Amino acid sequence: MLCALALLGAMTAGASSAADRAGHGGLYDSVRISTVTGDQGGVRIRVYDGLSPTVDFELCEGWCNGSEVFPAKIDGDRLTFTYVSRWVSEGGSPGADSIPVSGRFVRDGLMLKIGDAPPELVRRARPRPR
């Protein structure tokens, strides 16, 4: 009897954990183009929830260079992951910075905090009409 209860408890904990992540998946986008300079700025993030959540993340500063996939953690309405910003020095040496990213899923999208920057609302993208 005790084994059955323990097994049921473990199964229920796993199910509630997966249920907490369900519904957060999708595309969130705040990228805008300056009418003055033509520069792009903002964030584009696609959240993949499920048993092993990931994010496809793109930070645009002046331009958008493409996205990268990073492992993520979704706990209830909270999202965390580490963004690895890769760069090349003037001398041609590659480098990278690890930047913590945290967010909270809200009604209109995802309130996202990247490193030391203030939180920014990244709205859930609307599906395009077919």
Image (cartoon, grey):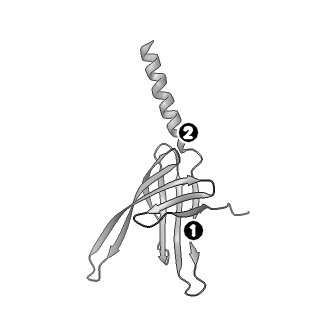
Residue type highlighted by circle 2:
Ala
Q: Where residue 55 sits: x, y (%)? A: 48, 56
Q: Where residue 58 sits: x, y (%)? A: 48, 67
Indicate the quadrant where residue 97 lies: bottom left
For label 1, the crowd category at 10 Å Cα-Cα, with few meaning under 14, some 14 to 19 and many 20 or more, is some
Residue furthest bottom in the image: 36
> Which structural element holds mark 2?
helix
> Which structural element holds mark 1?
loop
Q: Name the residue located 26 percent from the left edge and 76 percent from the top edge.
A: 93
Q: Name the residue located 53 percent from the left edge and 59 percent from the top edge.
A: 111
Q: Which residue is mark 1?
A: 30
Q: CA distance from mark 1 to mark 2?
A: 27 Å
Disc on the earlier residue, 1 or 2: 2
> In the rendered image of this protein, does residue 65 appear above or below residue 57?
below
Q: Where residue 19 sits: x, y (%)? A: 55, 39
Q: Quick check: 95 left or right of 102?
A: left
Residue furthest front in the image: 118
Residue type highlighted by circle 1:
Ser
Q: Quadrant of the N terminus?
A: top left
Q: Which residue is mark 2?
A: 19
Q: Nearer the viewer, residue 109 or 14?
A: 109
Q: Nearer the viewer, residue 9 or 104?
A: 104
For label 2, the crowd category at 10 Å Cα-Cα, with few meaning under 14, some 14 to 19 and many 20 or more, is few
Q: Name the residue located 57 percent from the left edge and 68 percent from the top edge.
A: 30
Number of callouts: 2
Q: Quadrant of the C terminus?
A: bottom right
Residue furthest right in the image: 130
Q: Where residue 112 sits: x, y (%)? A: 50, 60
Q: Which mark is residue 95?
A: none
